[in-house]
Amino acid sequence: MVTRLNFRFFVLLPFCILLYSWTWGQIFIMPAQTASALAQQLVGGGVQFTNPVLTCAPNANGVFTALNAGLGLDSGIVLTTGAAATNKNYVGVNGPSSLLASTNNNMPGDAMLNVVSGQSTKDACSLEFDFVPRGDSIRFQYVFSSEEYINATCGPYNDAFAFLISGPGISGQKNLALVPGTNIPVTINSINSGVPGSGYSLANCTSMGPGSPFTNEYVDNTNGLYLTHKGRTMLLDARFGVQPCSTYHLKFVIADAGNYLYDSGVFLRAGSLQSNDLSTYVTAPRTPIGQQFIVKGCAPATVQVKTSQRPIPQIVKMILGGTAVKGVEYTIVADSLIIPANTGQTNFLISPLQTPKNGVKMLTIKFKSPFACSNELIADSISLLIYDSIALRVLTPDTTLCARSSFTIRAVTDSIVKVQWMPLSFLNDATIIQPVSTPLQPIKYFVKGTVPGAGCMLVQDSLSIQVLPTPTVFTMDQTVCNHNAVTLQATVSPNYDHYTYQWFGPDNFSSKSLSPWLNRVTPNNAGQYIIQVKTDTSNCIAEASMILTVVAPAPPTFTSPIAFCQENKVHKLSIAGSNIVWYHINDTIGHTDAPTINAATEGTYHFLISQKDSSCESELLPITIEVKRCCEGHVIIPSAFSPNGDGLNDLFRLKPDFGNTVIQLDIFNRWGQLVFRTFNNEAWDGTFHGVPAELGVYFYDAKIACAKGGQMRYTGDVMLVH
């Protein structure tokens, strides 16, 4: 019942912590508990308590959980001389050590602690109750902490606490809060750093008893993050021998010494108040999920039964159960055992018997308490699986296969068996029952199985594998230009004359040659090519693949034919695109320089052009260039004129027909000087700057706009005469 109550409390504790309005760090405290709630937290196995009484200020006690706080214990109860929880009204034990924990609760002291500390005590907080131990000793664990540490060390303010037990075999009250291995009470002056506070003498500490102060039991907390007190003890054990099944009284009390200032506290571990009764330990292997077992025909399990030492032998009764049958699956001692006097322990064996396989069985043994008051209670129990004798068998028969072929070796054994395959060659995992092998040569595998810790003999089996030769094929991805030839390359080893080859590829490609040749590739030939190589002595086939990439640049885009009007002009050909290559008909080598066309005469010209991408060239496309006469009819151009005013041939004028027009006429003298220009076919009257020009030869340059489009250019000379 106690265990169930503790569990339910800690399930609710996180929720309660959320409701509490002020908590610090990683020590969480729920203050103002009842005496029963505190006792339930403290009491563990083998102890029953009654009549709990709490004499303490409500804010000075509580239950706590410590999460990675370095406190030395993770949960339990706390009793203080000030406040348990830090909140808006009090500085308690939880919080950084930079806070000052010093609360006056105006509570009286404790008479027993007056003796322990040598001072008048104040603000006492005590929890007491009756209890009945099932065993012959009790123990609990605690940590003492105080704000008196550092400044008041070895001074008169020797805050103290006591764990007072009374009952059968005890004269008066016995203080269990003692420095380990001594009769010296745990106080500020008995456990500390060994450095007196300002103005105090170390003699106040050494006078506590031999070895005091015990610095090895002290933890400095001056820079602590989660405990306000400046120092604390290590986790301490309190132990005491009792009479089983008798009623005792236990009082936990703490108080300030000398004044109400500077608080102290004691943290007691949850469930640590226990009474030893009986415990067992089994020496046997465990399954992967932690269940202990033995194996038929293998080593026995050893069971150790321990209790407290007593001057007389102790009889422990056992209850055997489970599906295993005594005398069939196992042998064991009688249904009870004797723990010899003054030993506190005994051992016995559970030996598995070699019987026909009948499945896994379970053996349970319950141990009754050896003490008269509780010998009907189950003090401890064990459970043990009993496996059939282990077996290991390879199911895969001796095998012949092609080199580098993978297969799973089929074998069976029990789940508890650890296997090891030898040799390790070509196995993916030599420690599993069904490994994958990819052998390159003949090999014989051995598998051994054992059950670690079970004392079983090795079991083993074997498998032979014959390996037929398989060639190794190497290929390489290739890139080729469109319309070029390519040889599919493959290398086969070892060198052997009796191979057969088979290629498969895109566009229904097939070849039985090792290195087939593709004459004029196109994008349809691009893709994956697979070669299979086979020896004529077996069906072992090696296979490899390669990717053929065909680079096919796009051809240039243009309109053909391209027409030029006949005129006295040279045209350099130009096509939109990058890296254009020109070919004259019957050329085998292209040129990046575009050809030129002389438009002085009519004619038709034929070329081939392509476009290059890196080292690859597009397909060749034909292009036609035409030079044609755009102006029909003729232009009448006089060869001489005489501007003498006789009305005959006085002007020089061009006369085009068929609607053609003169758009520019320039006339130059023999020194190249422009003497006349017109844009609308005006006539030259033979003057230059209004003065008659010299007689002689003049040169003309005329542009004629053709009625059907295009232009014609005419040049020549004319004679100026009288």
Image (cartoon, rainbow, N blue to C red):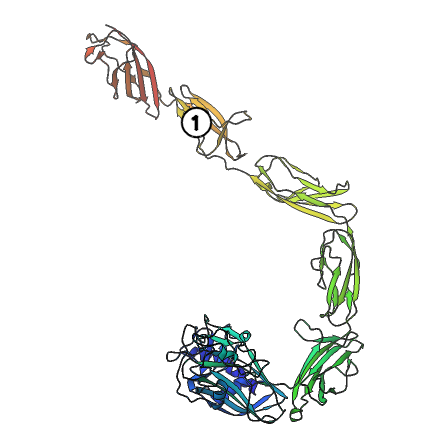
Q: Is residue 250 above or below residue 478?
A: below
Residue 446 or residue 339, whichever sits in front? 339
In screen coordinates, is 114 left or right of 236? Answer: left
Kindly identify the residue that appears in the image at 78 percent across and 48 percent down: 538
Give residue 126's position: percent from left, percent from top: 48, 88
One can see residue 45 in this view = no
Give residue 485's position: percent from left, percent from top: 61, 35
Residue 521 or residue 292, whichever sits in front? 292
Residue 704 found in image quarter? top left
Residue 285 found in image quarter? bottom right
Which residue was labeled with disc 1? 573
Label 1 sits on a secondary structure element that is loop
Q: Quadrant of the C terminus?
A: top left
Image mark count: 1
Q: Is residue 39 above or below residue 532?
A: below
Give residue 721's position: percent from left, percent from top: 25, 6
Give residue 561's position: percent from left, percent from top: 44, 29
Task: Using a 10 Å C-alpha cutoff, classify the residue at mark 1 as few (fewer than 14 neighbours), some (14 to 19) or many (20 or more).
Answer: few
Residue 245 or residue 341, whichever sits in front? 341
